[in-house]
Amino acid sequence: MIKKGSLTGLLLFGIFFGAGNLIFPPTLGVLSGENFWPAISGFVLSGVGIAVLTLIIGTLNPKGYVDEISRKIAPWFATVYLVALYLSIGPFFAIPRTATTAYEVGIAPLLATNSQWGLLIFTAVYFIAAYLISLNPSKILDLVGRILTPVFALLIVVLVILGATKYGSSSPAAASATYVTSAFGTGFLEGYNTLDALASVAFSVIAVETMNQLGFASKKEYVSTIWIVGIVVALGFSALYIGLGFLGNHFPIPAEVMASETNKGVYVLSQATQAIFGSTAQIFLAIMVTMTCFTTTVGLIVSTSEFFVKTFPQLGYKVYATLFTLIGFGIANIGLSAIISYSVPVLQILYPITIAIVLLVIVNRLVPLSKIGMQLTISLVTIIAFATIIADQFKLEGIHQVIQALPFAEASLPWLVPAVVGILFSICMPDGQTTEEFTLE
């Protein structure tokens, strides 16, 4: 049981490990300054805790979240939500981000001048190769991903340990304004950027398929193994995030870089690698980060295309793969900082809904819940999430004040108490329904 859980956990760690897992922790470390520990605590809670819990809950139902959402809320809502989710972890955010991260962390530091042409040429070659492989994904790519990702993660661990030894005694820079007013809440929101909780909804299907191949004698063994998987993934990512954040928090950054639009996480990774291992290490870093991001890109093109073929079979797999590759290529060329900037509002809508769905599934495994009550809960969370973004984007002070009056709004969780109230309301209503028991196949 422990062996099966550990093997599956390491596999999922490799699947999850991508661009966002690299760049956001050191960025947080730089910007949080003296408020690093509350900030990284919020980051780990949303980037690891919620992601792993989402994975575990999804894995408990072999039919996945589409079944849970369809029965508890509505089939149409399941379709709309999952389409938005797959587009987020696919062509609009995650796919282009892997390409731009590979370029900015690995390739750009090797170039004499970091021009838009360099990014364009790199992403053109990158996406052509990813597209060709996605048309006929092979087990070789999967094996390469399973080998490269753990090796790269190990190298990051070595970088973190050596970096902490070398720079750990230096003082952090002053915290940015958002980390001064709400370090935990800002860190919690930054954890959204990893996309891991959203990816957990999709990857829970992969976890089920992988675990079914291992074979289980009983439901008890299956459930116990799932929790072992969650612990392995949680420990791995928590250690990685805290280590990378600590490195970013103490790595010396020139004032002109701090004042510029340069992505601070990218800067720390590249400069720390060269400072610790020497300038030639940048070549090795370029190869490793590019290959690691590349396998993730192909996997996302394949999984997103397969979802859309299954949901909307009017178009074939090749059409979807072509479309998503072209969208990813186009968005990748607006640059990493721009991708992160425009993705934030969408993630601040999808994440609360995802967390609310997971809470409903957990509670409904313990007590009967009213379907109307569950629909009301998701509606409340969705309205608050949309209202928060609309108020921020259009500077609507009245709506902003209403949102801020809600409990935990300062911790970036204004939807939490309404979600809990909705769940309590669901328990009290008479038309309660229990979740279906699953059977091992």
Image (cartoon, grey):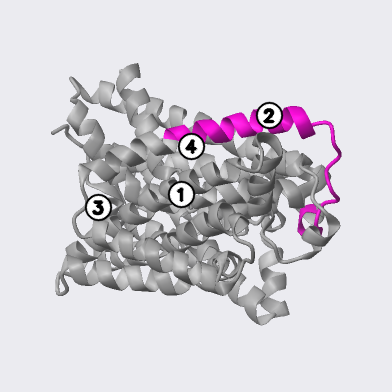
Of the two numbered discs 4 and 3 on the same chain, state the one appearing first in sequence: 3
- Asked whether disc 1 touches disc 4, contact meaning CB atoms under 8 Å apart, the reply is no
160 within the magenta span: yes
> Is residue 423 in sight in this rendering?
no
| Label number found at residue 67 | 3
* Image x and y of residue 113, in percent: 64, 66
> Is residue 19 in sight in this rendering?
yes
Which of labels 3 and 2 is toward the front? 2
Q: Residue at x 44, y 28 (%)?
A: 232
- Dot 1 lies on which element? helix
What's the residue type where badge 2 is placed? Answer: Leu
User: Pointer 1: what residue?
Assistant: 197
- Asked whether disc 4 touches disc 3, contact meaning CB atoms under 8 Å apart, the reply is no
What's the residue type where badge 4 is placed? Answer: Phe
Give the Cα distance between marks 1 and 2: 30 Å
Of the two numbered discs 3 and 1 on the same chain, state the one appearing first in sequence: 3
| Label number found at residue 89 | none
Q: Which residue is drawn at 47% across and 46% down?
A: 287
Give the Cα distance between marks 1 and 4: 22 Å
User: Pointer 2: what residue?
Assistant: 162
Looking at the image, is 154 positioned above or below residue 262? above
- Dot 3 lies on which element? helix
Of the two numbered discs 1 and 4 on the same chain, state the one appearing first in sequence: 4
Of the two numbered discs 1 and 2 on the same chain, state the one appearing first in sequence: 2
